[in-house]
Image: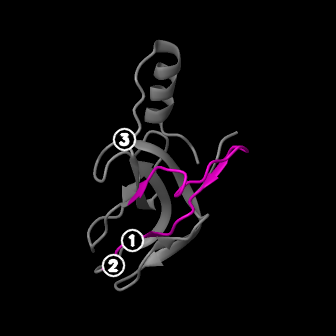
Amino acid sequence: MPKSDWLKNAFLNHLYNGATLTLPATIYIALYTSAPTTAGGGTEVAGGAYARVAITRNTTNFPTTSNGTMANAVIANYAQATAAWGSIVAAASFDALTGGNMIKFGVMLTPRTIGVGDQFSFAPGAILDTET
């Protein structure tokens, strides 16, 4: 998953300037119908009972890794759509339920269209991040 410009700059300022890099205890996973870039943007789903899913950052939800790859160990369920959300093409992690700073993002291997009554979820292992 590519790092956002915010995360790259915050990390470099932390590493070289001693600036504090505070990450939240909870990350929030947003869904997109138009993918963001490292600078942000994209089109996040809105309305129809949509809300970012909160996942607490810990070793139960994201088991420790030593090989540079991390994946979720829990299901991330979104609310049932009360209006069509469209074709979900990307997801991103944030430090807030609304607004906030985008941390990382990824494009879906297979987009999924969410209509009225559908429910989107990420199965364990579906939120996959590799650092190289």
Image height of 16 relative to 41, above or below: above
SS for dot 2:
loop
Left or right placement of residue 12 versus residue 31 in this view: right
Residue at horizontal 66 percent and vertical 41 percent from the top:
131
Residue at horizontal 41 percent and vertical 44 percent from the top:
102
The x, y position of residue 56, in whole percent, is: 42, 54
Crowdedness of circle 3 by 10 Å Cα count: few (<14), some, many (20+)? some
Q: Do the residues labelled 1 and 2 touch (CB within 8 Å)?
A: yes
Q: Hey, what amino acid is under mark 2?
A: Ala
Q: Hey, what amino acid is under mark 3?
A: Asn
Q: Give the range drawn in magenta.
A: 54-81
The x, y position of residue 3, in whole percent, is: 53, 40
Examine the image and state in which quarter residue 123 appears: bottom right
Indicate the colouring scheme. one colour
Q: Residue furthest top?
A: 17
SS for dot 3:
loop
The x, y position of residue 120, in whole percent, is: 45, 74
Question: Cα distance, mark 3 to mark 1?
Answer: 20 Å
Residue named by callout 3: 101
Closer to us: 125 or 31? 125
Crowdedness of circle 2 by 10 Å Cα count: few (<14), some, many (20+)? some
Residue named by callout 2: 81
